[in-house]
Amino acid sequence: TGGYSVKRKQTSHLSPSSVTLRFAATALALSLALPAGAQLLEEVVVTAQKREESIQDVGIAVTAFTGEQLDAFGFTESTQISAMTPGVFISGNNGGTTQQFTIRGSTQNDFADIAEGPNAVYIDEAYMALGQSQLFAAFDTERVEILKGPQGTLFGRNATGGLVHYITRKPTAEREAYIDVTYGRFDTVRTEAAGGGAIADGINGRVSVLYNRHDPVIDNVFTAGDLPAPPAAFGRTSIQGSPAGSDDLWKDDQIAVRGQLLFELPEENEFLFKVQYANQQTTSGQYQHESTTAVVNPFG
């Protein structure tokens, strides 16, 4: 715009052909600056204020990702969006089995099961109360919205730092299906599939499934016999640790299923019935309740 105003002031010194050439050069420079296949950003519709509206009209700091963008980034877990969201970080313990969001420095230091953090997490407007529930598989996702700053007036008392809202893909009348299979190191197998469409007049359905697993990253070659025994004065015959301390570490087994029925009601109303199941089993680093060294005898 600034360049155009300068040209208007100097119109008497520029011929029409020179002005045309300058505009052509500017357009060429812009086209070369954009990557091949790049497109202008389309309107982004969010529900940050409990209603659908353009993100340009929302007076809240919002970062939104579409499902296609999540796939392009390779994000498969809920907390991975922090890598592309300014002001959002991840904290946790137990070798990554417990993760939670930190938004603009607002976080939770208590990792107990019953502790609710200051950053709320929602899936389809359902509040995930426990801290451990913030780590889940992201599959067949429509979009995700990250709202920064106090959101208690719309999303409750546990949104003082902000919130993360995952919106899954809803059933439509159009029949569609897809399957995505990935294989990688440590015999990693991840399969995501979904399909749906019109079941009857005014009734649409959709089923989404996820299966993900990989072998342990670290093999524990030690056995119980390799652990040194403390002196009898300590009142024990072996070092006490976590029950999972002898397991191989950092393996993952996930399975999730989601079924939805969307009923179209009169006057553009809808009723959504959803059933979902998910199970995830991971192993992290073992821990001891006392200061000890498992390889070198601490009492020698």
Image: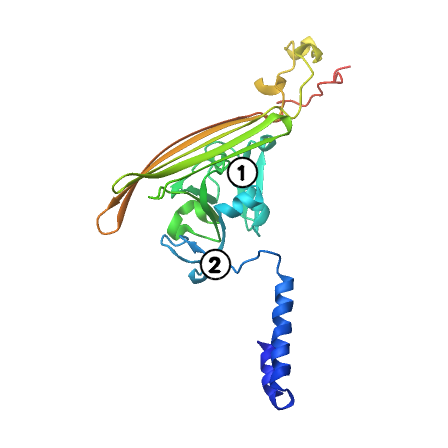
Q: Residue 244 at x, y = what percent?
A: 58, 19
For label 2, the crowd category at 10 Å Cα-Cα, with few meaning under 14, some 14 to 19 and many 20 or more, is few
Relative to residue 196, is residue 160 depicted above or below?
below
Count of labels in the image: 2
Quarter containing the C terminus: top right
Q: Is residue 102 left or right of residue 222?
A: left
Q: CA distance from mark 2 to mark 1?
A: 24 Å
Q: Is residue 238 left or right of residue 149?
A: right
Residue at the disc numbered 2: 42
Q: Residue 101 at x, y = what percent?
A: 53, 43
Residue at the disc numbered 1: 76
Rendered image: mark on residue 85: none
Residue toward you, 300 or 194: 194
> Is residue 29 visible to us here?
yes
Q: Secondary structure at mark 2?
A: loop
Residue toward you, 275 or 246: 275
Q: Secondary structure at mark 1?
A: loop
Q: Residue 161 at x, y = what percent?
A: 49, 49
Q: Is residue 145 left or right of residue 96?
A: left
Q: Residue furthest bottom?
A: 12
Residue toward you, 133 or 288: 133
> Is residue 89 visible to us here?
no
**Closer to the camera: disc 2 or disc 1?**
2
Relative to residue 57, is residue 11 depicted above or below?
below
Residue that appears at 42% across and 62% down: 57
Q: Residue furthest right?
A: 300
Query: Quadrant of the rendered structure where residue 203 is?
Result: top left
